[in-house]
Amino acid sequence: MVREFAGLLNRYRGASLHIPLNMLAAVALFLGMTLPQGSLFLIAYMVLILFLLIRELYLKHTDPITNWAYTFLCQLYIAAPFGLLSKVALHQGEYAPLLPFAVFALLWLNDTGAYCVGSLLGKHRLFERISPRKSWEGSVGGALFALVTAAGFSWYSDLLPLRQWLGMALVIVVFGTWGDLAESLFKRQLGIKDSGNFLPGHGGILDRFDSSLLAIPAVWIYLMAGEYIRNGF
């Protein structure tokens, strides 16, 4: 995803990002946030970021500020959210892999429901300026799919109470939609249809996981807020 994102910025925005080093930094950040003993990876990440910033002093690019800004955007927009998946999986200090699985299941079923209902009933555009095909009817349909799935997770597992499962589903619906729209805005600004051609007919990896980039941090905040409220801060 970082490769696609940085490559598009280089091609259409005139940036001069070092793609392999940005990819390596993203992997280091992900591992540093994910592994129990990830301090060495976080040190490696900071070394790489410092190098990427300092190198602009010597390369004489016409717009080094753009390269600095896009370097941080690559890391914060893509690498950091996936690093937070490991934090989502920690529930009251215990490893709960069902939670990150549920995040993706709810995202995909929300997208599926929105597509199906929107194709059949969609008349009122949700955000026509950015994504002309999305409709309010589709968004409501996707939300219903996600809520029913969340209720199923509640029946399957007592990890969270029903109301918290349903709340998580709504957070994913809202922020997943915003994540999708954010990537659509990015592509519209660049004047392109897909982020890549990794999956013929379906676009790039970034196109497949765009909704998760805002949904994962939002779910982590939601779950952390629930723990703080439950424990009385």
Image: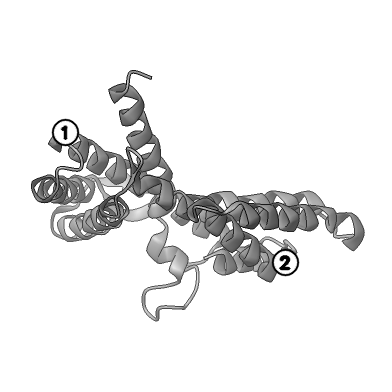
- Report the number of numbered marks: 2
Residue 40 lies in quadrant = bottom right
Q: Position of residue 152 (x, y in %)?
A: 10, 50
Please say whether residue 127 is visible from this viewpoint.
no
Residue under pointer 1 = 163
Residue at the location (39% across, 53% down)?
212
Mark carried by residue 18: 2
**Left or right: 133 as drawn, with respect to 195:** left
Residue most toward the bottom?
200
Q: Evaluate if marks 2 and 1 touch, with contact meaning CB atoms under 8 Å apart.
A: no
Q: Secondary structure at mark 2?
A: loop
Q: Is residue 140 above or below residue 224?
A: below
Q: Position of residue 32 (x, y in %)?
A: 56, 54
Marks 2 and 1 sit apart, C-alpha to C-alpha, by: 46 Å
Check the picture and name the quadrant holding the C terminus.
Answer: top left
Q: Is residue 9 above or below residue 128?
A: below
**Left or right: 97 as drawn, with respect to 181:** left
Q: Nearer the viewer, residue 165 or 69?
A: 165
Residue type of the residue flagged with mark 1: Arg
